[in-house]
Amino acid sequence: MIIGVKINPKLQEALDHCPPNCQIYFKDNNPDYLQIYTIEGEQVLGKKLKPGMNRETFEDYLKNIKSIIKKICPQYSLSESEIKVYVHTLIG
């Protein structure tokens, strides 16, 4: 499962204008930061959830996602309702 934000046109524009020194937070395929996943044909900026995580850890993931998006896209106004859990089937 992935927790993250669907990349809409406004978020995509903000990502396109992200300073180069902040792109490490979503472009380097580093699981410590955000990654871009394609789920059911749509792009989602988020993190992979670990199986069986407790509520406190889940809330830490939420805070981390909000913090990173604010850092890489300070002009983007992220609402809490945009952050969702997505099921992602890996093949292979």
Image (spheres, rainbow, N blue to C red):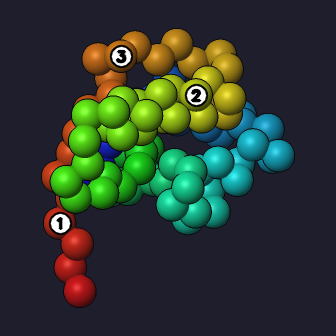
Instruction: Evaluate if marks 2 and 1 touch, with contact meaning CB atoms under 8 Å apart.
Output: no
Q: Amino acid at mark 1?
A: Thr
Q: Amino acid at mark 3?
A: Glu
The residues bearing labels 2 and 3 have C-alpha atoms spaced at a distance of 12 Å
- The image's mark for residue 67 is 2
Disc 1 designates what residue? 89
Above/below status of 81 relative to 91: above
Task: Tell me which numbered mark, 3 or 1, is placed earlier along the sequence.
Answer: 3
Residue 80 seen in render:
yes
Disc 3 designates what residue? 80
Query: Alpha-carbon neighbours of circle 3 within 10 Å: few (<14), some, or many (≥20)?
Result: few
For the image, the number of numbered tags is: 3
* Residue plotted at (79% across, 38% down): 19
Q: Amino acid at mark 2?
A: Ser
Task: Tell me which numbered mark, 2 or 1, is placed earlier along the sequence.
Answer: 2
Query: Considering the numbered disc 3 on the image, is that residue within a helix, a strand or a loop?
Result: helix
Q: Is residue 84 left or right of residue 59?
A: left
Residue 69: image location, x then y, percent: 57, 31
The residues bearing labels 2 and 1 have C-alpha atoms spaced at a distance of 27 Å
The residues bearing labels 3 and 1 have C-alpha atoms spaced at a distance of 25 Å
* Residue plotted at (26% across, 34% down): 55
* Residue plotted at (47% across, 28% down): 63
The N terminus, quarter of image: bottom left
Corner quadrant of residue 18: top right
